[in-house]
Amino acid sequence: MSGGAGDFRKRLERAAEVRSYRGAGISAEEEAALDALDAQEREKRRKVSDAARAEYLVRDAMAQGKFDNLKYAGKPIPGLVESYDPDWWVKGLIQRENISGLGPAAILLRTEDAELDAKLDVQYTEQQVRDVLEDFNRRVIDARRQLQGGPPVITKTRDVEEEVQRWRGRRAARVQEASAEPEPERSWWKRLWKGTG
C-alpha cells in the first residue's frame, strides 16, 4: 500500500508543478501539452470509483495515525440505543452548551418547579415570595393555554399561602440553626485585643 501512496503523492506533486507552469508565461504548444496532461489526469480520476477513493483515503489516514486516540474509541456511542427523537440535536445543543431559558415551556417549567424552593429561600420579604409565586402560577396557566404542540404541561400551580408558610418555616429553621451553632472561641490575642477576658 505504501507504494500506491508514494505514486499518488508523486502524481499530486507533478500536478502542482504543472499548475505552477501555467502562470510562468509558457508558449502555446507547451500550454496545449499541459492541457492534454490535465485531461489525462482527469480521465484517470474519473475511472476511480468514489468508494475506492474513500477506501484509499481512510487507509491512508489510518496509516498516518489520524484515527488514534479518538474520544469514543472502544466505547459505545452515547444516544445510539435510545429511540429516535426528532429534536435530538436541539436537546444535545442545550445540554452541551448549558443553555438555559430555551426549549418547550413544559420542560422549562418543570425545571423551574424543581428549583423554586431555592429561589424562594433567597427572597427577603413575604411580598417578594408572593410575587415570585404569582408569576410562576401565571406562566404555568399560560403554558397550559398554548396550543403550539410539544410535550404536555404537567407542572402544577403552587398554593401561594401554603408556600409562604413553608418559606417561613424554612427561614425560621435557618435562623435557629445559625443561633444554635456556638461561637468559636477566640484566641488569646483576639480576646486581649478586643479587651474581653
Image (cartoon, grey):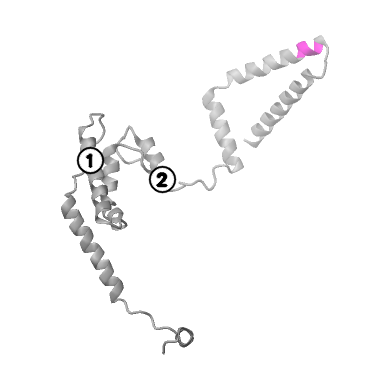
Quarter of the rendering occupied by the N terminus: top right
Q: Residue at x 36, y 41 (%)?
A: 101
Closest to the observer, 52 or 66: 66
Mark 2, residue position: 98
Closest to the observer, 155 or 82: 155
Residue 33, by quadrant, is top right
Q: Residue at x 72, y 13 (%)?
A: 35
Residue 154 % position (x, y): 20, 41
Residue 46 % position (x, y): 59, 18
Residue 142 % position (x, y): 23, 36
Q: CA distance from mark 1 to mark 2?
A: 26 Å
Instruction: Mark yes or no: residue 64 visible.
Output: yes
Determine whether the residue tagged by mark 1 lies in a helix, strand or loop: helix
Mark 1, residue position: 138
Q: The residue under label 1 is which amino acid type?
A: Arg
Q: The residue under label 2 is which amino acid type?
A: Asn
